[in-house]
Image: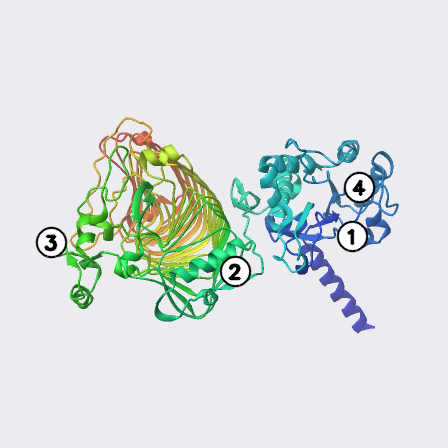
Amino acid sequence: MKKYLIYTSALLLLTAFSFLDSKPRIFLIGDSTMANKAPSDAPETGWGMVFSEFFTTDVEIQNHAVNGRSTKSFRTLGHWDKVHNQLQKGDWVLIQFGHNDQKVSDTSRYAAPQTDYKQNLIRYIKETRAKGASPILLTPVMRRKFDENGNFVDQHGDYPAVVKAVAKELNVPLIDLHEASRKVIVNHGVEGSKQLFMHLEGKVYPKFPEKKIDDTHFSKYGASVMASLVADAIKTQNIPLASYLEKFSPEKYTYELPAVQEPAFRKDTFSIVTYGAKADGITLNTKAIAEAIDACNKAGGGTVLIPQGLWVTGPVVLKSNINLHLVKGAILQFSSDFNQYPLVQTNWEGLPAVRCQQPISGTDLENIAITGTGIIDGAGDAWRPVKKSKLTAGQWQKLTTSGGVLSDNKETWYPSEKAYKGSLTPKAGVLEPGKEKDVTSIKDFLRPNLLVLTNCKRVLLESITFQNSPAWCLHPLLCEHITLRNLYVKNPWYAQNGDGVDLESCRNGVIEDCTFDVGDDGICIKSGRDEEGRKRGVPTENISIRNSTVYHAHGGFVIGSEMSGGARNLFVSNCTFMGTDVGLRFKTTRGRGGIVEKIYVKDIQMTNIAGEAILFDMYYSAKDPVPQPGDKNELPVIESKPVNEGTPQFRDFYVHHVICQGAETAIMVRGLPEMNVKDILIENAMIQSKKGLVCIEGSHIQLKNIVLLPEEKTVMQIQNSQQVVLDNIRYPENTDLLVKVTGDRSKNIRLLNTDGTKAKKEIELGEKVSAKVIQKK
């Protein structure tokens, strides 16, 4: 008996703790548009399958939706009982039916809208509330249908109106997914909206050997879009569930991140060996690879296979519906013979230009990929100039005795006389209206980027190693729906212009799980240069960068300096920068123009940063961010100039949770007198550095919950800045000076929730600064 009582007491105690720790639950009930699918059903995806991605782990989501069910059959087949029996106070039930209630010929499912359908909804609501749970009604999600004139056709009759009427009558939260999905489909257009649904070519997915057109069920992309509509309605209507939505920043939610379409390919495979390619390290396989790509494209697409081996080639030009696949052990080695790369019209650092043909290129393509675990080598060592200051004495001797040409001052090596001549030519290769240029005499200087994709849609680069590029490594330009996943991108640390990836004027993209170790910027966002970039007017937008690592690079994550078309809605999370010159690097200069805004960065780790951990710089001068031996790092002349179309703007940045172990400067803000860096919030950061905060010409700058651990004895320096909030700043004891404010344009500096007694002197004001400029609280 005693043992029984002890057991019973323990069970009751565990139950009590379990109740206290239990999470609220969201139950989804509905039809196939919401339901989970088996892997064999790919790519069909119910929106309920991705719904949980938009919530924190503080809520549990159970998807009980079932293919083919109506308000009637969901109950009669026992699905509702499984939900109802679990419901308890604090739970939520999202109810979406209608597609199958319309099936008049099927008595097991049909429910007339004004009678059975209405009563079935009311019964679900009342039974949910009887358990202490809360119902939410959703109008049926739209099917896709356009008439011959391109007008959208609604196929749901009275059902959506009945849902609205019931919601109003019983005071139930309503998500009008019917109308929201209509807007999305119409905005995508007749052709674009096919990507939301199951429009499949045959022989791509095992379940669908033949072509399939299904305008009811969603692709993975479509499901993500529909789930985001539901999440947005929860937030917009301030339904209590909104408190469980995952946030990227105080005002930006995870569901607002871009949904990105990925390519899919037929199962047909075309090996380059079939077309005469030889892996002997000598044979030039340019023609064989081109023939394999052409045959695959003409057959409707598929995989062009690069088997194990060393395959030498000249330029490779991709075509639509091609997956260039390199198996493990495959090396696609581009030739170091400059004659293989004719001069072509292209783009260079945001300007129209003539350059040597890119090793890999594609223009106006759709549905393309480069995948596998092989290596693509651009033979960059044959092309690049090298500075003496970046090599050891032994490396420099080896390089200079191998051939090539030295500059007049003997500080830079060039691979040929043509390359050196090009370095002395102003605007080499740049196309200027009304000016004809013969650039054949400087051809070797006009290095190509390793991979350039221009105006392409649905692009995937996955698991490949890209290395040794002549200039930039990866350059997508004007591309949409682009995914870079699990790439290893590397160049020698001394590689001039050896950027990792430069997304230029692209929209809707993801860079995830990638590693960069390069000679210039690691992950870089661009959008054209100066007047030409402004004329193009295409920002880089809706890009998510996550779970990636940058080793050596000028900057870990970078925007600019060629950002004249603007950049917005960029999301950077869970990235690591180790040994980069700058961590977060935002750079521009007068003449660029363009607006960079709505930039969201969180969960960044850094170590051994040679320069600034976080840098906003509107005086970019095209020099190494950390001066090389013999270089001067002169401060810019500060003078105000008139605002015009060439005046750049940095605004609306949110940076959250940054940890940095070692940097020259923790945070540098350097705006223009006529256009401050503005509306910057940096919170929850800890940075060890030599210098702390340096803020020059900043406006509405807020630092909140920041630990600054500078070696220098002045923690924060503010010059000609206004509306600066320093909230809960922690710093080392016995610091000489906490805050120094200078400049006659400084005003409205607020020091909040910060213990100034740990410093020998709390505040120092410059000659022209009034004591009223800074306020403490």
In the picture, the disc for residue 433 is none
Q: What's the distance in space between the residues labelled 2 and 3, CA to CA?
A: 50 Å
Q: Quadrant of residue 539?
A: top left
Q: Is residue 639 visible?
A: yes
In the picture, the disc for residue 303 is 2
Provide the residue designation for mark 4.
125
Label 3 residue SS: loop
Q: Position of residue 577 (x, y in %)?
A: 38, 56
Q: What's the distance in space between the residues labelled 3 and 4, CA to CA?
A: 83 Å
Going by the numbered disc 1, the residue's amino acid type is Val
* Viewer-nearest residue: 609 or 465: 465
Going by the numbered disc 2, the residue's amino acid type is Thr
Location of the N terminus by quadrant is bottom right
The local crowd at label 2, few if under 14, some if 14 to 19, many if 20 or more residues have their Cα within 10 Å, is: many
**Relative vertical location of residue 391 with respect to residue 56 in this rendering, above or below:** below
Which numbered disc flags the more N-terminal residue, 1 or 2?
1
Q: Position of residue 556 (x, y in %)?
A: 37, 53
Going by the numbered disc 4, the residue's amino acid type is Ile
Q: What's the distance in space between the residues labelled 1 and 4, CA to CA?
A: 13 Å
Q: Position of residue 316 (x, y in %)?
A: 40, 56
Q: Residue furthest left?
A: 408
Label 4 residue SS: helix
Tell us which disc is closer to us: 1 or 2.
Answer: 2
Location of the C terminus by quadrant is top left
* Viewer-nearest residue: 176 or 111: 111
In the picture, the disc for residue 409 is 3
Tell us which disc is closer to us: 3 or 4.
Answer: 3
Provide the residue designation for mark 1.
83
Which numbered disc flags the more N-terminal residue, 2 or 3?
2
